[in-house]
Each structure stands twice: as structure tokens, then as C-alpha cells.
Image: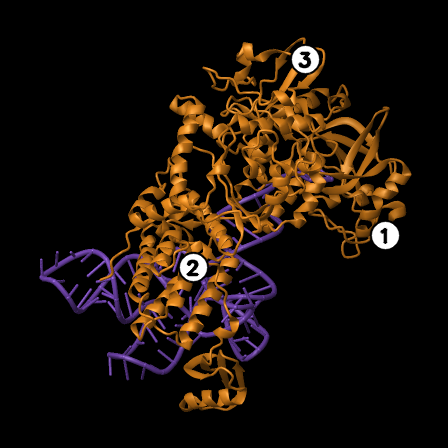
Amino acid sequence: MAIPYNHREIEQKWRAEWEKNPVNVDDGKKEKYYCLDMFPYPSGNGLHVGHWRGYVISDVWSRYKLLNGYYIIHPMGWDAFGLPAENYAIKMGVHPAISTAENVANIKRQINEIAALYDWDREVNTTDPNFYKWTQWIFVKMFKEGLAYEKEMPINWCPSCKTGLANEEVVDGKCERCGSEVTKKNLKQWMLRITKYADRLLADLDKLDWPEKVKKMQTEWIGKSHGAEVDFAIEGRDEKITVYTTRPDTLHGATFMVLAPEHALAASLSNTETKEDVDKYILDSSMKSNVDRLQGKEKTGVFTGTYAINPLNGAKVPIWLSDYVLADYGTGAIMCVPAHDDRDFEFATKFNIPIIQVIAKDGKEIENMTEAYTAASGTMINSGEWNGMQSSVLKAEAPKIIEKMGFGRETTNYKLRDWVFSRQRYWGEPIPIVHCPKCGCVPVPEEQLPLLLPEVEKYEPTGTGESPLADITEWVNTTCPCCGAPAKRETNTMPQWAGSSWYFLRYVDSHNDKELVNREVADKLLPVDMYIGGVEHAVLHLLYSRFYTKFLNDIGVVDFDEPFKKLFNQGMITGKNGIKMSKSKGNVVSPDDLVRDYGCDSLRLYELFVGPPDLDSEWDDRGIDGVYRFLNRFWTLVMDNKDKAVIATPEMIRLRHKLTYDITTRLNNFNLNTVVSGFMEYNNKFIEMAKNGGIDKETLETMTILLAPFVPHVSEELWREMGHTDSVFTAGWPEADEDAMVETEKEVAVQINGKTKAVIKVAADIDKDAAIAAGKEAIADKITGNVIKEIYVPGRIINIVMK
RNA sequence: GCCGGCGUGGCGGAAUUGGCAGACGCACAGGACUUAAAAUCCUGCGGGGUCAAACCCGUACCGGUUCAAGUCCGGUCGCCGGCACCA
């Protein structure tokens, strides 16, 4: 009977030993490898097996790199400011500083159970004044560079979280955090000019080894488009209305114009006859929430009574108002070409506005148009001097033509908006700005940072648009750093993203009290080589971090402009039937009991075995028995055979190299679930071998090293049991010799018309004719018809094609 | 609506990219050991068919290319994710 290995004992033993003698050391000669996890926010629920998986994947990868001779930077920290921490504190009735500290302690305990290579000396916490000093410092730098500015405007407001939100935090018109419907609120806000970096954020995606999906999401979020602005005169007035269009080639087909109800001129365009309707439409639109506006697919609108003049052909086009035009994109006004745009077509049909086709479809004009013809391909018609041109050519040329004619210009537009950066909540970094009646906005001098978050009794959000900090008069009232006159502090705080946008830089120099990061250290240890985390941050954290890094690169803090070279998104672990694990659903699986019963190594292995790492997987506790049995079988195999001095047979050597090759290839391709099944498969073969004459020690050692990134304790224990005095992590990753993997004999399937009838063994270097002859012999009794064709795929298939 | 991803046994999932479909594991069934149970070990495990074989069917569905299709092509259905009046 096999004695199951005592996981508690050996895990404790080796963790103590590794702490005393670390296996990951910087000797100054090794190349660095920076493998980063998305750091957790310390909520009260602790980690579940889904969080665990991400950390296991990154640790396996780190240890693999360690065995390949790298010095590993594999840090961990806490994203502890922000709404989740604060909401939890409010719910529990304790100060967020206290609950955060408690939660950090608990999650740290759980994370330590993973036995990852984390270097706790590098640990950061975004709520630590020594950390947020630099979060504030970056803000001050941005302010000085003109990238942080104040603006009053209607912003997204979550009535439940009682704070303003960035566009990125609004998903389907709802708060990303709590799911409440987002409303608009007019507030004076701090904004970050991320739009200044739009082009670089877009272009540099090309350099990144990231999942295409994430790159695409960022590309769409930035939403670059190319076109022209065209100035339309207003009939009987001096003002002009400028529209933005990506299809200036269709200018002759513009039969009306639509302005967003919020457009500056909207109200003034009505006449005595239309005034009542126009005013009502503007008012109604302002009352609609984002969700209503998005869901109201049926187009609404009102004619202002005023006409614009098409600058190209002098045609009179009616000016309408409609909320399908967005006020904050382009110029808030569009020219409408119903023949070649779906939305304009729908609007024109509904309100009986003429439709003029200007691009021929299949060479002719469409009779009884039932839908817009939106392709930019075809010959121009009804377009005056443009007739006969190809629309695809004209589309590119038109902006320049229009510019020459003097009523427009070539333009580029982005969907990306500047980043609403202030929050009306307590638990965040205070924005280090002083409002002076004389000097305006003055940044807190850099040497006075950090500007500490004051202690308060009442930190609940007010809901008025004022931060709870506004109530602390002794904190708010200060003097202007510039002129010394009485002044007031900014009372808004930063969003949770502020700290997470740059924390990965701090890890490499986390105790530096003079600089954000020492430039020499940064040059040596940064940027991040591999970043592992969920896909949910595709346009939030991952976009913000790129923006911050580019800014810090511009002001010389770091010498690179992309923070994360490679990104891996692990799939989510769900409960039964793919339901997301949550406390309210009661389907959360904690790693704690599993670690206790099966050990850290088994859970690590099972986290990988449960499914492909990039896909979501349903958790099923029962499966862990399989990997636990495997570990016990391997353990027993090593213990029973390590001292037997068996001389390796050619087959043992071949299998050993094949094992190394298979595991290494699968690991490099991140097929971690098949790495585990590979280990099991080879283990079964080795057990079989051991039964029939024994197994050599080198094969057992090789398997032990290959297993080390996955099951560090078991590997370390067995490695020492086999007589080694140094850690298994100093052993070096085995190399597969492809020559040693060559088989002398191959099993070949013999088929008739593609159906296997027999399997024969042939010499690997057998020639085609001999192979086919051997194959035919094996199935001689089944060859009854006329053989038309004979196929031999070396080492795989013999196919006899018969009629 | 548009753009991605996916669809394989009772279940999780493999399949060297066109070459023996179901590796590996879970669950289940039978056997060995045991007074018994657990653990462990051995055997079986897509469906039909047969005493057993032969044989037939089978990777969501329909069709195509090929000596050979889970894999490639055309179409249909379903699930998941992203975007969604951005002019």
C-alpha cells in the first residue's frame, strides 16, 4: 500500500527553509524577468479559488523562468484605496483604514498558502503615505504639464456610489462597480488629458504581445476616425454650423442637417412657429438618462424652422434637432445623407425628407430605396462636377478639395474622452491642489507631499457632489503656497485607478523616499515582461497604465513607454453552470479547506488541470482527487526506485527526452492543463516501466525538476531524498535532445479507404514501398477490390484506396 | 445590428494544425486485498450490433473539397464575450 505523502509536514518544512535560504537571488549577472500579477483589492471576502488560479499561473511561470536562469521579480501588493474597500468599511461600521488592514492580513495569509515566490520586501500598498506621496507627485507633474485641468460639465454620476465616474467605468449605462443606472450631474471636475496621448496609445498597441481581443477593445475605445469638417452657412444669418463627417464624398447627397439638442445654437434656431416644440424637445432630451437615450432606438426629432446652405451646391437643407446626435463627439452637428447612412435613412423616412442617391450601386440608381447604400464603392452620380469619380477615391480626396474650396478642413476624431479624475468619496488620495482666490489652482509644493488624508469621524459619501473632506474645515482652510493668502484645499479624491496606474514601477524600488523610482534601478529591472490577470480591465486599468507610463517616460522618470510587454488573461473560475462566484449566490469556493486537506501542491496542480488557462472553467471539487492521486503515485514511484541503480535502457532515455520536450513545449505555449495531463501520462508509463525491470534515477530526477514549478514542495522533498544537497530550483531546466527522441520503430495505422483495419510496427526509416507492402500483408484478407491508390504518410498512416 | 470566441462521451477536457477521435482526469460498474469499510491495486467504460467477433453510426446541423475532415470551404442553428446611434 502506498503511503500518501504528508503534505502538511513537507510544505511547512520547505517553506521555512526557502525563507532562510531564498532560491531567487540577484547575483548581478543573471538577466531579470519581471512577472506581475494584477494586485488585489483587499475586500472582506478573502480569496476564492478563481483568484488563486491567476496567482498559480504567474508563479508557475516565474519558477519556470527561475529554473531557466533568470532573476525573478515577482512582487505583490494591495490596491487598497477606493470604493470596494470603503463600501465594505461602511457596511461593517469600521474605519476603512482598519478594515483594510484586517483584510490585507487575511488575504496575505491566503496568498502565502500558494507558496509563490513573492518577494514581500517589495510589497506596496496604495494607501501607504509613502506610496501615495508619489501618486500625488505624478498628479502635480501632470498639472504642471497642463495634463490635469478643472472643468465644469455634466458627468456620469452613480447615485448609489454617490460619486462621479469616468466613461470607462460606465458599462451599458450602468455603474461598473454596483450596477446602478448612471445619471448625469453637472460638477466641477478634475480631468486628465488622456486624449493628448490618443494617437500614441493607438499606434503603440502594435508593439505589444497582448491578446488581440484586448488590443481590439482598446482600439475601439480610442475610436479614431478620419474625415472632414464642413462649414454650412445658415440661411438669413451670419453664423455658420460646422459638421464632422467621415463621408465628405457624399456631400452632394446631404438633404438635411441634425444638431444635438445640447448644441450651443440649438435653441436659437427656432422661429415663432417652432419655438414651443423645439424648446420642449431640448428640455425632454436633457431629462433623459443615458439608458433611455440608448434604448430609444426609434428616432425622434424636431424641425427648427431654419435652413442651412450646402456649401458645395447651394442647396437649402432643413436643420433638425435629434438626440441620436451626440453633443460631445465631433462638432455636435452632422450633415445627413440618407441615401448612404442607415441612421439618416431611418430619420429621413420617418420625417419624409428627400433622399438623393449620389453613389451608383452596381452602376445604376436604385429605384424605391428600402435601405441605405453604405458602401464607399461605386461611381458618383447626382454630384455635379464630382460625377463619374470613384467614391472610394473621392472619399480620401474630398477633404483636401473641400479645404481648397475654403469651406472645410481635413480632421481626425476620437471616441476617447478626457478622464474624469475626481471622486466625491473619502477613501482615496487627496488631490494635492489649493484653490487661492488670487492665484487660482496652485499645486501643493512637491516637498510637502504626501498631502495626508485627514482622519475623520464621518466618511460616508454626502451625495451632494461634495466630498466628505469638505466638512473638515480645519483641513480645508489653508494658505496659498504661492502668495500665502487664505485659501481652500481641493476636497475631491482620486479614483481607485490612480494608484494602480503606476504601482508596478514602485515595486522595484519600493523603499525609495527620494524618488518615485531610481532611474538606474528602473533601467535594470523594468518594464514588466509578463502581466497576468483577468480581462475585465481591458479598457480601464490597462489603458490608464499605458497613459501613465507614457507620461512618466515623457518627463524622464523611465526610459520605456509601454509598461507591459506581454499580457495573459486568465479565464474566470465559476461555480456550477458557469455562474460567477459570489457571496450572494453562495457558490464561493475558498482555497483554505482544500489546502488543508490536499495540500498546496495538489491545489496548484488542480487549478491548472481544471481547464485551459485562458478560458472560463467551472469548479468541481471532486477533480482534485485525481491530481492528489497522481502526486502520491509519483511520490511512491520515486521512493521505491531512487536507490535501485537501474541502468537506463534506450527506451527510458527516449521517453525522458520526450517528456522534457513535451512539457517544455506545452509550457511555452501556455497549455498548462495539458502540461498536467502530460505529467500524469508519463507517470503512468514510468510506473509500468518500474514494474517491468525498473526505472533509472536520471529519469526520476528529470521529472522532479520539470514538476518543480508546479509542485515546489513535493519536488524539493523528492529532490533531496534523491541525495541532492542544493535546492531543486538550482538544478537548471532540463534540455530535450531531439536526436535522443527518435524512435527506431513506429506504429502505423493501416487503412482501407481511410478506415483503420490494423496497426503494424515498422522501422522508422522504412521506405514507402516496403511500408505499403507490409501494410498490405497485414490486411491481405481484406483487400478484395481493385487497388487504385496507395498512400504512405511516414510513421503514421498507410491508406489503401480500393474500388 | 456589427465584430470576436466557441459547440467533441454521463462530466472537465485531449487530438503534434489535414493523418488511428475521445489522451489525461472525474464519475460510474466489476474484481483483488480486508471480518468489514476507507485507502490502494487491476479491469471495463461514445452509441448500435454480436455468445464473441466482423461490421455499422458518431466531433451542433446541412452540403462541399480530399486517398483521408473535429480540423479546410459554403450555408444554417445555438451559446458566450465585446461594441452598439461616434456621423
The type of colouring in the image is by chain
What is the x, y in percent for residue A115? 40, 46
| Residue type beneath disc 3 | Cys
Q: Quadrant of residue B36?
A: bottom left
Question: Color used for chain B?
Answer: purple
Q: Nearer the viewer, residue A411 or A387?
A: A411
Q: Residue A705: give its label.
A: 2
Label 3: which residue?
A436
* B8 to the left or right of A386: left
The mark closer to the camera, 1 or 3, is 3
Q: Which chain is orange?
A: A
Q: Quadrant of residue A637?
A: bottom left
Label 1: which residue?
A389
Tell me the quarter of the image containing the N terminus of chain A.
bottom left
Specify the subunit that label 1 lies on: A
Secondary-structure class at tag 1:
loop
Identity of the residue drawn at 70% across and 39% down: A198
Specify the subunit that label 2 lies on: A
| Residue type beneath disc 2 | Ile
* Residue A344 can be seen in this image: no
Task: Work out whether mark 1 precedes mark 3 in sequence or the reverse, and give the earlier one.
Answer: 1
Residue at mark 1 to residue at mark 3: CA–CA distance: 60 Å
Disc 2 to disc 3: CB gap under 8 Å: no
The mark closer to the camera, 2 or 3, is 2
* A763 to the left or right of A521: left
Q: Residues within 10 Å of mark 1 (few under 14, many from 20)?
A: some
Give the vertical position of A481 relative to A68 (above or below): above
